[in-house]
Image (spheres, grey):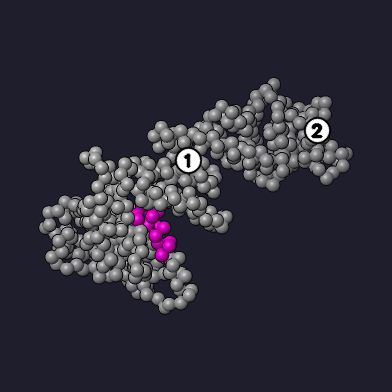
């Protein structure tokens, strides 16, 4: 009886005999390894010698191909053992006693509808080191189709059963295995949004957009754009009974009434630059990129007529870490911006209707964020919502050839302002000029 032979073909070839890995040097010849791979993929792990000769040495005459096959069998037996590889009656096969092949287990899981088992066995594409071998190409694509169809079906069942955490894990695995699978990305983004992780959902949308553009030169589908718009507008989320994503407190109709909300606002102002066709094109691209970054971090961004951009975090749904998300987005914008830029970030009250974006929203938080972005960080005494008592620099750090300065503005004695802000608010502004200065 042959010692236990275990073969892995998914994600790369590997062999074990009796629990010991077969080192690469034991194969001696590449064709000996290819012979074992072919037999591992063949029905009943058996092939006629003429089939092997035609596949491995298609350009050689029968005598030459036969001689090469005998050598390949000899070296393969040295690697995995003579008992594991048999030849008789013009057939070559792997001894079934003690044999385990990951492809067999994978196909059994697919046939049984065991998506979790199939995902666990699928370490990667079939034989990636034999990428251009015709005998592996068709099976490689077939395995991918079978796996992703089963996994997406499982994710849909889990989502329907409100098991969003498990659905997210399945979809994340599919995205990891197939980074250009748009359907998996969109389903993952929807599950993340339904689970209350709006910033992750928007980041997933942006991720597939970037991958499609860089790898395939394509734009996202109309479905992808609609999904992103729905997430930004709050139409997909853990609480979406009302149009704006809020749960009505009284259980009655949704009323578009004005209300005060504590939000974090980020204002982006681009430094003036000489006008020109190339400059204008770069500025437009930078503005587009800025809006995408805000949306990826969970904010709703809008452009003003003067070219500035404002983003609000906390509408339609309020999260505990809205301020942190806004600051993270601001850091990403200034560190990767293609043009000189200032960003002001402030948490405060706004007044408006229960809308998912900045439209129809006003308040001092918008004004203060713009002042921070413009470098005019001091505020007039007597402002009702957020009059500061003092401002002092709390942290300065080097960022390339620029400096960042953060201020903490303590709230004044206004009771409603103190209650709404729960303490202090942070402002952050990019300082100019862009020459390095001592910190």
The residue pinned by badge 2 equals 49
Q: Element under label 2?
A: helix
Q: Residues within 10 Å of mark 2 (few under 14, many from 20)?
A: many
Residue 284 forms part of the magenta stretch? no
Residue 22 percent across, percent down from the top left: 65, 36
Left or right, 148 with reference to 271: right
Q: Can you tell which mark lies on residue 273? A: none
> Whole-Å distance between the Cαs marked 1 and 2?
43 Å
4 over 61 or under it: above or below: above
Q: Earlier in the sequence, mark 1 or mark 2?
A: 2
**Quick one: quadrant of the N terminus?**
top right
Q: Is residue 260 visible?
A: yes
Residue denoted by label 1 = 171
409 horizontally vs 86: left or right: left
Span highlighted in magenta in the image: 287-300
Of badges 1 and 2, nearer the viewer stands: 1
């Amino acid at each position: 009886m042959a010692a236990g032979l275990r073969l892995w073909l998914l994600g790369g070839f590997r062999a074990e005999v009796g629990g010991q890995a077969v080192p690469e040097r034991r194969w001696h010849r590449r064709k000996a390894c290819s012979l074992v791979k072919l037999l591992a993929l063949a029905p009943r792990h058996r092939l006629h010698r003429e089939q092997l000769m035609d596949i491995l040495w298609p350009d050689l005459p029968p005598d030459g191909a036969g001689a090469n096959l005998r050598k390949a069998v000899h070296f393969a037996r040295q690697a995995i053992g003579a008992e594991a590889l048999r030849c008789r009656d013009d057939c070559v096969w792997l001894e079934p006693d003690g044999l385990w092949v990951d492809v067999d287990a994978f196909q059994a899981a697919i046939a049984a509808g065991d998506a979790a088992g199939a995902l666990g066995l699928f370490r990667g594409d079939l034989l990636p080191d034999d990428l251009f071998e015709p005998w592996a190409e068709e099976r490689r694509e077939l395995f991918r189709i079978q796996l992703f169809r089963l996994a997406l079906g499982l994710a849909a069942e889990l989502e329907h059963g409100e098991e969003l955490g498990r659905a997210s894990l399945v979809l994340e695995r599919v995205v990891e295995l197939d980074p250009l699978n748009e359907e998996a990305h969109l389903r993952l983004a929807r599950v993340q949004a339904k689970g209350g992780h709006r910033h992750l959902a928007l980041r997933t949308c942006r991720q597939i957009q970037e991958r499609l553009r860089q790898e395939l030169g394509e734009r996202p589908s109309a479905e992808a754009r609609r999904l992103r718009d729905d997430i930004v507008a709050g139409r997909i989320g853990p609480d979406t009974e009302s149009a704006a994503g809020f749960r009505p407190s009284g259980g009655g109709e949704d009323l578009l009434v004005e209300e005060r909300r504590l939000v974090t606002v980020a204002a982006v102002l681009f430094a003036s630059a000489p006008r020109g066709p190339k400059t204008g094109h770069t500025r437009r691209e930078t503005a587009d990129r800025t809006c995408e970054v805000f949306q990826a971090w969970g904010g709703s961004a809008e452009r003003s007529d003067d070219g500035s951009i404002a983003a609000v975090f906390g509408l339609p749904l309020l999260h505990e870490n809205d301020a942190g998300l806004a600051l993270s987005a601001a850091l990403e914008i200034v560190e990767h911006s293609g043009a000189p830029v200032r960003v002001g970030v402030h948490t405060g009250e706004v007044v408006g209707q229960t809308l998912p974006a900045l439209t129809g929203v006003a308040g001092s938080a918008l004004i203060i964020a713009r002042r921070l972005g413009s470098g005019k960080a001091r505020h007039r005494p007597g402002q009702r919502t957020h009059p500061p008592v003092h401002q002092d620099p709390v942290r300065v750090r080097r960022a390339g050839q620029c400096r960042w300065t953060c201020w903490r503005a303590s709230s004044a004695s206004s009771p409603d302002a103190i209650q709404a802000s729960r303490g202090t608010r942070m402002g952050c502004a990019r300082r100019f000029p862009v020459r390095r200065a001592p910190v």
